[in-house]
Each structure stands twice: as structure tokens, then as C-alpha cells.
Image (cartoon, rainbow, N blue to C red):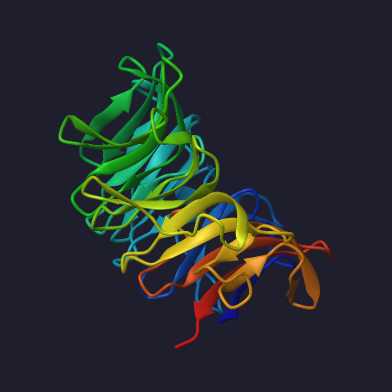
Amino acid sequence: MFSVAVVATTGERFSGFAPYVASVNDAGVVAFQAALRVGGSGVFAGVGGEVEEVVERALHAGVTSHPDLNDARDTSFYGELPGGGQGAFLHRDGRLQVVADTCGAFASIGPLGPTMNEAGTVAFRANSADRVSGIFAGDGAAVTTVADTTGPWSRFHGLPVITGDDTVVFRADCGDGVQGIYAGRGGSIRTVAETRDRFESLGLFPSANERGTVAFAATLRGGGAGIFTDDDGRITRITEMEGAFEAYRGAVITNAGAVVMIATPRGGSIGLFDGPDPEADRILALGDSLLDSTVEDFAANPVSVNASGQVAIRASLADGRQVIVRADPAR
């Protein structure tokens, strides 16, 4: 069972957190984007109690993604440049670095948001001026192309997720209509899964932990759906074929190897679950009671869990409030 720590709510200071998710590092610090009542937006962090502004707003013109946060409290995010244009930023050692921007080869940065590893390398999506979309990685000194649409891929989805050895896991569609999940590093690409023989469709948001284990949702050509993991080319189904869930939207894997599912129980509402029992393993779902109201919407993605299984969640409540909470597993 999980307990909930409230990190931030809309009110006098914050006017909104949507549509972005929150991230959490292994120390339990939750980072999130927030729009302010006085105008503008910024990157903030907290553990429940006082909320800290992580990046001085004078250094950027706005935040346009979730922030990702590593254990050194380096922070990466997409944002607007003070002089105009977009950038992928890395805040490290009290200094804001531009990893990539639209002042050069890129026409746009994003969408959605970046991920980063413990070394501070940032994986991000961007589009070039000649309409090439791609997956890239950078550390503030150099940018490397992982994959782009000059190759076999026609479109990218979700977040590129970077692991401890700088491998970047991404979801893409091929020009022949095949959906795939791939892992790129050092100029080589490994296929994790494709919709050829076994899989009918693949979820848009695969995740990967620091060791490189990949978790993803998929439907099967023979019928049914589930959550799968890939470990060095060995794909394992971790959900039961005729279990308690009727649909799976995504899976988030922790550095310890545990998997949090975004799934819908049979006859129930979509939610976050850390096991096969919709009641005992329930973290949060639509319709749940929260802070004297009811959950109407929630969001989490691969940056939203840490090694100990804590989950950072952005939720909208029936009374109009938006909240950032951290769900903590029972010890």
C-alpha cells in the first residue's frame, strides 16, 4: 500500500501544473513545472513542505516541459530563450547551460520533455530546419544524433530515455508502417521490439532504468495485451495473459527493476499499479479520493519513479485544484 505526500497544490502561488508530469530522484525530491499566479513559469522542487525554485526565472523565458532530476540534483528541461527561440537546458552546479537551441541547426525542440542520466547527459527530441525529426543526446558541450528521419524511421513518439551508459531507448515508426522500440548508442542501433511476428502494437512510452532494462506495453498478434521487459535481448512478459487487467497503456521501470503499470482493471478505471492485484497494488486511479476531493485526471511517465518505488504524480481534482504528490510504498 502507498501513502501520499503532498508536494504542491494550485492556490496563491501556483496557477497550474498541466500538462506536464513531475519527476523524482532517488532521494525522494520531486521536481515539476509550474505556472505562477504572478505570470511566467518555472522549475520547482520539494519533498512536502516548502517548495524551492530550482532555476532562476531570469535565466529563461519560460518552461515548456517537465524537468528531469538526477541524484546530484542536476535538472534538465525544455524552455524558451530570453532572446526568443527554444532550448533544451541543463541546470548543473548552479549554472544554466544550453544543451541545444533553435539559434542554430534546430528549428524546434521537443515535444514532451527530456530525460537525463546520473552523469548529466540529456536525451531529447528536436526538429531541424530541413524538416528532419530526430533523437539526440547532449551534455552542454556537444550534441550527438542518436536517430533521425533520414534513416528507416518516419516518426518518433514519447520520450527518449537515456541509461547509465548513454544508451538512448526510443519509440519510433518505420517507413513501412512497422512500430518499434530501439536502443541507440555510439552510432549503433539495437532493436528491442517490433510489430512483425509477435506484437500487434507497442505503447508510445517505453521506459528504461540505469542498467538498460526496458519496460513497455504491447498488444499481441494472437490477441491479448501485457507489460513486457527486455534485458539484453531477452523479452519477458511480466503480466498474466488472463489477469485482472483488461488494458495496458504503459510501464515505468525503476533502477531496482520494479515495474509500475499504467493499466485498466477489468470493469475499473485506469490507474497506476505496482503489481497484479488492482486493489492491493493500487497506487492511484481515476475516481479515487484525494485531499478531500476526487481524482479526475493524472499523469506520470518514465521520469516519475525512483529506485525505491516512489512515484511522482500530477493530478487534477474534481474541485478544480491541481496537485503534485509523491506516492510512497509501505516500508
Residue 210 found in image quarter: bottom left
Q: Residue furthest bottom?
A: 331
Check the picture and name the quadrant holding the N terminus. Answer: bottom right
Q: Residue furthest top?
A: 130
Q: Residue at x 39, y 27 (%)?
A: 196
The relative height of residue 311 versus residue 86 in the rendered view (above or below) is: below
Residue 242: give x, y in percent of width and height: 56, 57
Q: Residue at x 30, y 27 (%)?
A: 147
Residue 120: give x, y in percent of width and height: 26, 53
Residue 68: give x, y in percent of width and height: 42, 55
- Judged left or right of residue 293, residue 225 is left
Residue 244 found in image quarter: bottom right
Q: Residue at x 33, y 23 (%)?
A: 148
Residue 7: give x, y in percent of width and height: 58, 73
The relative height of residue 69 versus residue 89 in the rendered view (above or below) is: below
Image label count: 0
| Camera-nearest residue between 261 and 23 | 261
Q: Residue furthest right?
A: 319
| Camera-nearest residue between 163 and 319 | 163
The relative height of residue 239 versus residue 280 in the rendered view (above or below) is: above
Residue 288 found in image quarter: bottom right
Is residue 24 in view?
A: no
| Camera-nearest residue between 289 and 315 | 289
Is residue 229 in view?
A: yes
Check the picture and name the quadrant holding the C terminus. Answer: bottom left
